[in-house]
Image (spheres, rainbow, N blue to C red):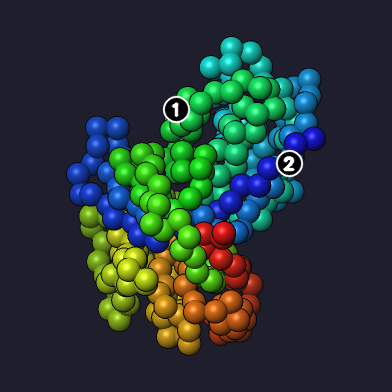
Amino acid sequence: MSSYTAPAKINLSLRVQNKVREDGFHNVDILMAPLDLADTLDFHNSRTTTLLCDAPGVPVDESNLVVRAIREFEKLYGRKAKQRITLTKRIPHGAGLGGGSSDAAVTLRAVNEILGTNYDSEELTAMAATLGSDVPFFLNPVISRCTGRGEIVTPIPELATWSSPLVLLKPSFGVSTPTAYKRLQNSRRLKGIPYGPQQVDGITLVNDLERPVFAKFPILGIMKRWLLEQEGVRAALMCGSGSTLFALTETPEQAALIAAAARQELEPHLFTYCGTVNPQ
């Protein structure tokens, strides 16, 4: 058995260009950073490719990005890459945290190592880009600028050692990324909700998708405003297209207090996580 971890990510910033590309995507400029929250994937040689997952509701058929990654790998390999994969989910689904993309990228790296094919980073990146815009980032999950539709990944060396405590809050519902982009042009800002750029350690935090997503799900805007009112919060933002919000805090202890207060004041069944951005 070979075991791998697949980290979550947050978008420290997400800017969307107005013009839609010929492929239907928007050009974006994203500052992406890994978290210490991670899924685990265990790989076993097998007679067929099968996927097992401990999370109810996560598909384990050909629609799952892990299986799709295997199929994409097989196109270059020219043979079946037979694996029994056990996926232990810790990253919530539909959260904007990149769980499925990370699982797919790790699958490509793992199968490349297990089969000894030694495909280089360019070949793996080409496979990853066909699976999703976020997938190439997770082949080397360090703080990076992601451009194009998100698949052009440029690590930022000056932020390599930067990190911060954080708290994640995710309500029970998810948000469709395509829907968020489709509503981008026609949505309005909610009164009393802060949308402007925030500064932390020289990093500008802003998310252009907050406007369309908050317009459809006002509770998320209310949660962001609540986070910014909490002691020790340096910045708060929606991650990707949501529905997760995150806050950078001064200390891990403050993050834990905010998570407890959120479950008491906002929603008792809220998913919360306290951890680190860009763990060293």
Residue 116: x, y in percent? Answer: 66, 22
Instruction: Tell me if 85 is positioned left or right of 31 in this view.
Output: right
The amino acid beneath tag 1 is: Glu
Q: Which mark is residue 122?
A: 1
Visible residue check, residue 188: yes
* Foreground pick, 121 / 177: 121
Residue 217, disc: none
Say which residue appears at 30% left-offset and 32% top-offset: 23
Residue 240: % across, % down = 42, 56
How far apart are labels 1 and 2 at the CA level?
A: 24 Å
Mark linked to residue 3: 2
Query: Does 229 appear above or below 104?
Result: below
The residue lying toward the viewer, choosing from 131 and 278, is 278
Residue for point 49% across, 77% down: 249
Which class describes the residues within 10 Å of circle 1: few (<14), some (14-19), or many (20+)?
few
Q: Secondary structure at mark 2?
A: strand
Question: Which residue appears farthest toward the top when viewing the image?
Answer: 78
Where on the picture, by quarter, is residue 235? bottom left
| Mark sitting earlier along the chain (1/2) | 2
Secondary structure under tag 1 reads helix
Residue 222 in view (yes/no): no
- Residue drawn at x 46%, y 63% as measured from the top left: 162
Q: Residue at x 60, y 39 (%)?
A: 106
Image quadrant in which the N terminus is located: top right
For label 2, count other residues whose C-alpha is less than 10 Å away and answer few (under 14), some (14-19) or many (20+).
few
